[in-house]
Amino acid sequence: RYQAMPKMQTVSDHDAGECIVGSGELSSKKASKQPKIKTKLSRAAKKTSDLAEIPEEAKLSLTINNGASFIKNSRCPNDIIEDCETIPRNEILGQIINFLCPENINPKDHFLPSNRRFTLRGMGGLGKTTLAAMAVCSPNIRSTFDHILWLNLGNHFKGSNRNNLNYEMYLSCLKTLCQQLNVSVELNREVFLQPGDTSMIISAKCIQALEKSKNVMSKIIDGLKILIVLDDVWSHEDVELFNFGEHNMTSSLSILLTTRTLDREPQLGSKTISVDLFNKKEAHYLFFATAGLLGNVDAQDAEAIDCIIKKCGYLPLAIRTAGRLVKTCQAIQIGMSLREISSVLQSTDSPRMAPVIVLLDHSFSFVTNATTSFALKLLFSAFTVVFQRENMLRPWVSIDIVRLLWSALLRSIDMMEYRQSLVKFKLTKLEQIADLMCDMGIFDQKYEIGTNLQKKQRYLRVHHDLMWEYGKYFSSKISFVRGKLLTCDRHQIACCDECFADCSDMIHSRNTKKWNCLIINQFKSSCENPKAYMLNWLPLHMINAGLLDEASKLLQSQEFLEDQIKISGIENSIFTIVSFVRSYEKSLDVNAFMSQSPMISVISFARANLISLSSFQIDDSVRREIGHAFILLGVEFQKFSKWSNSLDLFTEAKNIFRSINYDDNHPDISRVSRHIDSCAIPSLVLVPRDSKSKLCLKYADVLLSKKNSQNVSLELSSNPGYGIVRTDHNSHVFSHKGVSWEYIFLGVGPKDSSLVVNYDGVMMHSVSCNRSLCVAMGSLCEGMVLCIRSQTKSDGIKEKETETEGFEAKIHSASVFTIDTDGSIYPTLAPHLCLGFAPIPALYIVARDSPNQAVFKYFSELKNSKHSSSGLGADELLKECGNNLVKLELSSHPGMAISQMYPNMASPLIPGVQMGGLGLGPAENALAGRINEKNQMVVSSLFSEVTITHGLAQNLDIGKMIFVSTHFEPWFCEFVVNDNGTISPKSSDQFVFGFQIPGIYNSK
């Protein structure tokens, strides 16, 4: 701070403010003996009215774009601002006013009013300056003080390499104060330096000059009650330069300051408030005001507003910027929806949000050396990228684990130059870097007792979501090539927004992979080898580094799971594993029809271990944790469209809660029951346009918009909380006469699993796999199920080309849809129908040990029916047996039976073949049937020769839908009746018939 400036103007030693105007150069001894020119010191006058004048800086802070001021002369603090873009935060304002204007002051108190200091601390953009401006506009403040003075210290550091005031800057501040007091004082004085003065002597002379200038200012304001607002303080040492009350002032002096940095040695009697983010109500108020929105908004606009505010992180500056963007966009493009505008704001790179990025970047300006500041940004960016969980952007990370990353990064070739700059800045230890970032308001810190219970462990996290966004933004702009920072060819600068805009995602991806590899290698070579890192972070970093096989093996390691449970407990361990599973899936650009994700095996592995653990004699508290863990795994299975598997887990969780004697009103029972209900996925079928089961899309207007019909969720407005989902994870194959395609049936399920599609006005394509929405088998008739299908493939035989072309044309016609204005979807060639949901739950293949299996009431009769029907065909069987067919009623679901979904059967592509769905219906609608000599299940129907089938044998798996069809040889399936009353495919006795609704045995 106290270095001699080339053109320094300082104060000479005069009791009453005598002035010597120097040239700014070094002066000789002879010059120091010049006669003193004495002048009379001007003093500030008292206020001329009851209220002190409001500083111009405060007025500017509370003025909107058109120059209209919101300042009122009301006696009520709440009325200071009216109908403006500023939120009166009355709680904080009240604390400021009560502290600076206390009632019944005792002058003999141990701390005097002259030393009162109130600090507003927080990251940039929180509204600290606005709060200070609102406070000084308060009638209470204005009536208490004779003068209110305002200094923006941050403005003095712009264009300099400093973060605190030197003598020249200090003199400029004093002149500003004098101007606000209407006092004319000559403060241009020089420090007399001798040739050969050491840096210590020069510093001592500068300190002496500072104190003398400070003494002059204290005499100017002596006798007056003064409030000084110091805005944007970077160094808390600077505040002491304005503590004029130290020089025996006879009147009170108070200081109100705003800062981002932490004061580690606060003055006795001072008070600090950490300014928080807006709450939801305040955020909505500011957004509506800045966006110019009037009245109520519809549900879709309200959701878009919530997305925008969440993206802004409830930061006032970001919300104000976003609100003004909305106002501008709607003025330029009339009719542009809030959802369309919100998509622009979803990217941190949006040029409209540049002021927020500049503000966040300014947080590192505390470090004035550009190279050192860049090094800190790089370390911070690596922290945000590496320590980010799928379920948490800003997790707490122990300092030991942070040390692994930063040590590896600083030892890399990329950081050679920057490592030296940190040493020059006296940041030789990683803990010192962490301390500095905490002081700068970039990190939060806390201390907790470690697992060894001997000492407290230090933890760090990013201060705010937008600071995390800045770290991600920075990582997308920096690129190193052989240890050299890459600069753009056009501007020769790094982090160029203009030149690197198109490759920012690629740069971010490359840095993410590199930094994760660095910390993994550092962990493997570290002698400490902390287990906490291996359990909490290593799988995630393997995934982000592209080491997917290693991550999968680690997550299926018995030792890894047991260590997780020992340290974190059962529920927390499964929660952590689930977060790894989600990160794994997110890292893949996979085809939605992939046969099996390794993460499904990870979930199954965890489930098997929990089932084994639950078989022991354990406390109810542990059993409850296992139940909660089952719910976590079941929810994750739903993300893979493994509805049957998830239902099994939810049912097992409910059974555990029942074993603890929880009643129906217990929160755990209510919670798991809701999850069980979410597994009942009604099939997506064609229904009449006037049907009560008609479905309407929530974002139909977006799909109908030509500009923004990309990546839209098929969430439903007709069924809030639900959307169109896949009924299975695996794809199935249909093949006939040389033409084949892959498909997955669709249903209605939880909105979080909704398909995301693109719509070109003709066809709807799934984003994840580019499959098309299609009516199964090309049959545009009521009750036919819908699917997403791949492109058709043909065997290329020329003799079949004509037949193949006709086949493909029918399939294409069944893939053309129109979206109505009410959100409904209908086949363009069958406008009398639309998408809806099936009236009853479908019949599926489930695991043999599933708690949701279908148990037949008359299974013994079904077994014996095979012998009595020997030698009879399906037609003969129905004529011979008539009412003697076995009723397919269920004991697992009392009062229910297997029934047809619709009375009519659909006519698919294959001539002469008809098919229909089966489901769980009331017993009075039960189908009846027998097992014939070919082990086929022949059932009564409106049609003859109807058999139960699961389709092609190659498609048989858990979740495969069961249906009935007329004669079609590739679909002939053999079944056996098991001794427990279930029915299995003969070739796969590990499967049985079941539903996505638990039976009575599992609901008790």
Image (cartoon, helix red, strand yellow):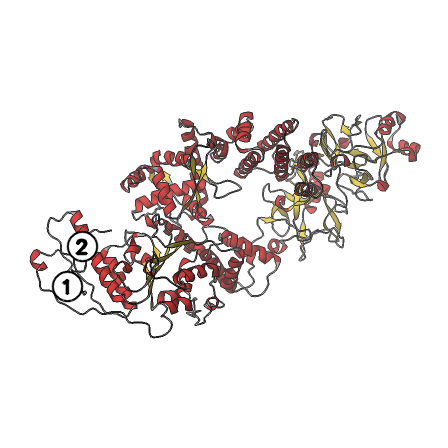
Horizontal side of 344 relative to 941 (left or right) equals: left
* Res 5 seen here: no
- Find disc 2 in the rendering and name its residue: 6
Quadrant location, the C terminus: top right
* Res 653 seen here: yes
Residues packed near mark 2 inside 10 Å, few (<14), some (14 to 19) or many (20 plus): few
Residue 62: x %, y % from top left: 42, 65
Horizontal side of 245 relative to 905 (left or right) equals: left
Between residues 907 and 60, which one lies in front from this camera angle? 60
Residue 398: x %, y % from top left: 44, 37
What amino acid is at disc 2? Pro
Q: Quadrant of residue 620?
A: top right
Residue 121: x %, y % from top left: 40, 53
- Find disc 1 in the rendering and name its residue: 20
Between residues 945 and 37, which one lies in front from this camera angle? 37
Residue 29: x %, y % from top left: 8, 56
Q: Is residue 32 above or below residue 586?
A: below
Circle 1: element type:
loop
The earlier-in-sequence mark between 2 and 1 is 2
What amino acid is at disc 1? Ile
Q: Quadrant of residue 113?
A: bottom left
Between residues 490 and 517, which one lies in front from this camera angle? 517
